[in-house]
Image (tube, helix red, strand yellow):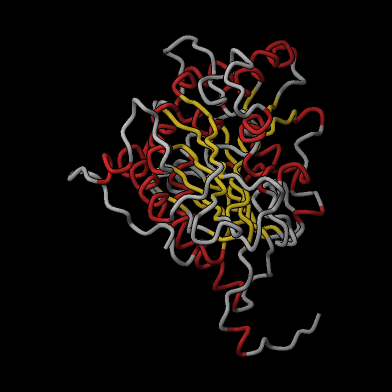
Amino acid sequence: MSDAAPTAAAGRRPPPPLPLTVLTGFLGAGKTTLLNALLHAPELADTLVLINEFGDVGLDHLFIEKVEGDMIVMSSGCVCCTIRGDLVSTLEDLLRRRDNGRIRPFARVVLETTGLADPAPILHTIMAHPYLVLRYRLDGVVALVDAVNGEATLDAHDEAVKQAAMADRLVITKTDLPDGEARLARLDDRLAKLNPGARRLIAAKGEANAAALLDCGLYDPSGKIPRVAQWLGAVAAEDRDHEHDHAHNHHHDHAGHRHAPAADANRHDDHIRAFCITGDAPLAPASFDMFLEFLRQLHGPRLLRVKGIVALADDPMRPVVIHGVQHVFHPPHRLDAWPDADHRTRLVFIVKDLEARFVEQLYAAFAGSPRVDAPDAAHYADNPLAPRPSGLLG
């Protein structure tokens, strides 16, 4: 590859966005141990690591082994709240230094959060900032769960439940300890109900390697082939396998969408549901925009994560990919073609305290096929208090 200066035409276009992985997990889950192991993998040779710290004195970085590469430690607060502005400044400064040759070029960023971090504001920062969204792409969220203390942590801390529910990969640690091995089956079952779309990996078996944790976003490393089925996860696959079979399994409900069985209502994760909505007919862009706007404005905090591929009537052979975290959505991306033979709209939701039936009913109304006992699109759109479309789809 030539070291010559880029052409003027190339200089006007930003380079391909850099993948950014968020590594989270509650206190004591083993993030530093996993990070130490990952940083020796050749896949992370050109990785820049951001280590967030909480408290006046930074300690975490003292336990990170010295490796070839660059590490930046952000202290003076938790990345999910008090230093979100600092996170933006840090990510922007890294790009300037990289572009100007003042730092060794890096091809990937890993952000390790504090154990107390709510992932949502971090994802908002990456997905919604007008400049950062051009230069970074969220590759995935990796959440660690301690097998010894995991169930107690999920019972006691809503942040831990959010970390697990919003993850693309769940790494279960400390199963090599007697207590961890004994509690693994119950924890694994609980995580499967909490986030059925996330791949679960056992750290002690070597499953949490770089190949399994990296490049878990929509695109493969070449950026050419969208991996929609893998990205949407097991919820969408399950819906595909059982579509239109309303009574095939007692874990499924009216539209083939999976819901966790009722349990102790005081557990944080019993307030969280994962389900998939599918549609055969393309939607008018304005109708889909209104559907999303209702959800965002009326129930934004309850939308932990939304992923989907959508067929729109203006160009049904070029679907639109959407990705949202609460009220913040990444700018939609239009694919050149469908990645496989399945041309249906598929929307995967992970929600908190929001009934799947309501979301399905709302989608059906704007898709032009409301149920006989449910409002149609005009009912929602003609309401003077209804939110106005904000043009997410342009």
Residue extending farthest to the front is 372
The spot of residue 368 in percent (x, y) is 41, 42
Residue 126 visible, this orientation: no
Q: Is 221 displayed left or right of 368 in the figure?
A: right
Say left or right for 125 vs 69. left
Does residue 68 lie above or below 60 as drawn? below
Q: Position of residue 296 (x, y in %)?
A: 36, 44
Q: How many marks?
A: 0
- Where does the image place residue 70, in percent across and percent down from the top left? 66, 60
Residue located farthest toward the left when viewing the structure as drawn: 384
Instruction: Identify the residue shown where x is 81% and y is 79%.
Output: 1
Q: Quadrant of residue 205?
A: top right
Image point 53% across, 40% down: which residue?
A: 279
User: 14 or 293, which lies in front?
Assistant: 293
Q: 259 and 92: which one is in front?
A: 259
Image location of residue 106, percent across then percent down: 68, 65
Image quarter (top left, top right, bottom left or bottom right) of the C terminus: bottom left
Q: Between residue 103 and residue 322, name the one nearer to us.
A: 322
Q: Is residue 204 visible?
A: yes
Residue shown at 37%/59% (left/top)? 391
Asked if residue 219 is positioned above or below residue 364 in the image, the reply reads below
